[in-house]
């Protein structure tokens, strides 16, 4: 499983589209096996869900996002967790 966390510095970004980038965590057997940072390629409507799907992301975690963005992630097979 691959999890993307939208981040700004050491914090979860309040808006995924305007984040500094994404920490990608690779999970195997309930453990993080690898972590890497991917810079945000830019905020364009509908682009980031496809970009993260191309990175084989299964889950996105962000401080917040709109309903349209959530729907686009779900359409790309990515589970969304915001809070």
Image: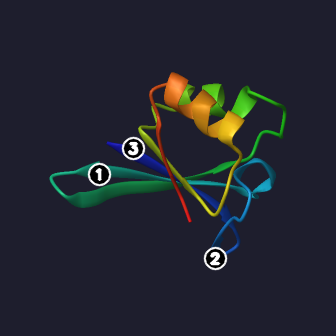
Q: Earlier in the sequence, mark 1 or mark 3?
A: 3
Q: Is residue 39 left or right of residue 58?
A: right
Q: Which residue is mark 3?
A: 2
Q: Distance between the Cα atoms at labels 1 and 3?
A: 6 Å
Q: Residues within 10 Å of mark 2 (few under 14, many from 20)?
A: few
> Gap between marks 2 and 3, in whole Å?
19 Å
Q: Position of residue 38 (x, y in %)?
A: 63, 48
Q: What percent of the width, then of the height, locates residue 14?
A: 71, 65
Residue highlighted by disc 2: 10
Q: Position of residue 70 (x, y in %)?
A: 60, 39
Quarter placement of the N terminus:
top left
The residue at the point 53 percent across, 23 percent down is: 75
Mark 1 or mark 2, which has the lower sequence index? 2
| Residue occupied by mark 1 | 27
Residue 49, by quadrant, is top right
At 70% from the left and 34% from the top, the residue drawn is: 68
Residue 82, horizontal then vertical, whole percent: 55, 58
């Amino acid at each position: 499983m691959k999890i993307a966390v939208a981040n700004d510095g050491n914090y979860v970004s309040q808006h995924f589209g305007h984040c500094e980038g994404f920490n990608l965590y690779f999970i195997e057997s309930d453990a993080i096996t690898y972590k890497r940072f991917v810079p945000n390629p830019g905020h364009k409507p509908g682009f980031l869900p496809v970009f993260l799907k191309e990175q084989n992301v299964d889950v996105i975690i962000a401080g917040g996002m709109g309903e349209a963005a959530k729907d686009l992630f779900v359409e790309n097979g990515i589970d969304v967790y915001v809070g």
